[in-house]
Amino acid sequence: MIEKTTDSVNFIQKIIDEDNESGKWDNRVHTRFPPEPNGYLHIGHAKSICLNFGIADKNDGKCNLRFDDTNPTREENEYVESIIEDVNWLGFDWEDRLFYASDYFDQLFEFAMQLIKSGKAYVCDLTGEEIRTTRGNLKAPGTESPFRNRFIEENIELFNQMKSGNFENGEKVLRAKIDMAHPNLNMRDPVMYRILHASHHRTGDEWCIYPMYDWAHGLEDSLEKITHSICTLEFEDHRPLYDWYLDQLDVFHPQQIEFARLNLNFTIMSKRKLKKLVDENHVDGWDDPRMPTISGLKRRGYSPESILNFAEDVGVTKRDSIIDVVRLENALREDLNKRAPRVLGVLNPLKVVITNYPENHTEMMEAVNNPEDPSTGKREIPFSKELYIEQNDFMEDPPRKFFRLGPGREVRLRYAYYITCTDTIKNDKGEVVELRCTYDPETRGGSSPDGRKVKGTIHWVSANHAVDAHVRLYDRLFLKENPDDGDNFLQYINPNSCTLLENVKLEPSLAIPENITYQFERNGYFVKDEKDSSENQLIFNRAVSLRDSWAKFLKQSGH
RNA sequence: UGGGGCGUAGUAUAAUGGUAGUACAUCUGGUUUUGGUCCAGACAGUUGGGGUUCGACUCCCUACGCCCCAGCCA
């Protein structure tokens, strides 16, 4: 048997290894995470954050947090704050390196002047429409702007006037003079600056011209001495332009590397569409627990560790792919299985009266806090004559293989006694609303001296001691595997993506829950909703259910 | 049919010329006071066609498929 230690590294790490070998960057690794503050961060950003900060960590390097705030019409401070909070929550540290593209506006302007002076940029009076039509198309080359050969002095004068606010939005732009017949459309005299009389969340009304992404981004990287500028695949076509700008100015020249963004099935990842869900109230806000946002996952009960593990697990390549959202859920289960305290909670209560148990008597049952981690110790749960069990742990006419409670059947109450169902009480509609059971006093703690076996173990809560709560059961937000494909993603919204249970009974230790995710035994993982819970109303969100092979069996056998 | 990328089990991801491996999913079985966890096993793959080579996922040619690009968005 050969023990394999497959320390396989992704293609970006391979590039870094090669760079370190050749001494390309003097063995320096410096990355950056450059979000635009125009929305909340989602799980796709988490992949990028883990990649950029992770690769810096692994290589003893640094990673900057930089806001790419070059478009005041879309950006807001609320987003800046949420992004800082989310990256922090994930556990990454940019130390004193929090930057903004807007910090560089002066330098960017000077660099542009430099390009103008070397005859590599010009002020163009064409309208947006005209620029589009003269750009040509995928097959045909573009045609040169009539303003392309303005004198340098005139360009300088005009560009200064653009900055001074002498023109209306759209009246003029600054363009790079490259090649209108270039096979790469991005190289056909791209716009560097546009006029935007808009107030910026950081620079206010100081500027009315704003740099375009391609012009700004490489210079931001350059000024920060970034070595590896990691971005997503759609920027591959922009790399020649990224390189062109830096070459013209002869400044520090980072290497742009592109990787495939994260896609999840049954999920949308576009910020624009997520914003639509929020704006049109299809969800409860950016941090709705059904949202794939970092803040939503947090509110749902996800741990940062599980997200980090997930990001590591899915890897980094250049292939477009769609990851099964089940893997995200599994990453959570794996983390929480190790760490979540176990508690008993009944989601859909069915009353049980133990007929041979004394009235007004309570005894404390010892329960293990986490079988995966004995160091977390034990706790005591009150037991008494009247209990609640889960409705679906009882069946009047149980099928084969059902080893829970039924008429005449015996089951074990977790950490308590064996009970046998002796009678059922029904309402007018014939539904079972209460059970009468007997208990075997010899089975305290859950095992019998005579060694007889019971197949089923079910959870319970003492009726008089129970804590009342609401629980929200979440399901996927979209019914379609790829909601993005097709006309309108809104039509694929799952109408049952959130189920509210208003009569949940919890063990007393949950009266004042900690801000952690618990395992409700045999049910799943739940966290208190800090936002919606109030002093007299406790609300828990279900992060994810436990794997349930019984439910799977039922489903496969057609209920 | 311009340019740029990508094709390995169902889904992802390794293997840089030398036994196609891993995870998740699926299916079997075992353990279990959570139908959880854990353990064991099974199923299943190099887009097609040529070529180079003792040997090809890997190199070459060719065909096919998929993704991205015609914002004064990022």
Image (cartoon, grey):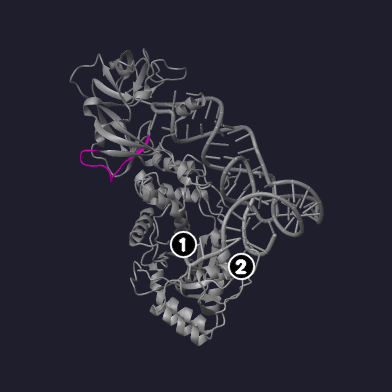
Is A253 on the left or on the right of A526, as rendered?
right
- Tell me: residue A449, above or below residue A23: above
Instruction: Check residue A538 for magenta coloring.
Output: no
* Badge 1 density bin: few <14, some 14–19, many ≥20, Cα 10 Å: many
- Give how far across and how far down residue A270 sits, in percent: 46, 53
Q: Position of residue A240 (x, y in %)?
A: 58, 69
Please name the residue that numbered disc 1 is placed on: A56
- The chain that hosts pointer 2 is A
If you read the primary sequence from the N terminus, does the residue marked by circle 1 or circle 2 appear first?
1
Residue at the spot 52% in from the left edge and 44% down from the top edge: A482
Tell me what residue is drawn at x 61 percent, y 67 percent. A136
Q: Main secondary structure of the magenta part?
A: loop
Residue A536: within the magenta?
yes
Is residue A22 something one can see in this rendering? no
Residue A529 in the figure: left or right of residue A360: right
Residue extent of the magenta highlight: A524-537
Q: Secondary structure at mark 2?
A: loop
Residue type marked 2: Gly
Disc 1 marks a residue whose amino acid type is: Ala
Position of residue A192 measured from the top left corner of the image (x, y, whole percent): 49, 73
On residue A490, the disc is: none
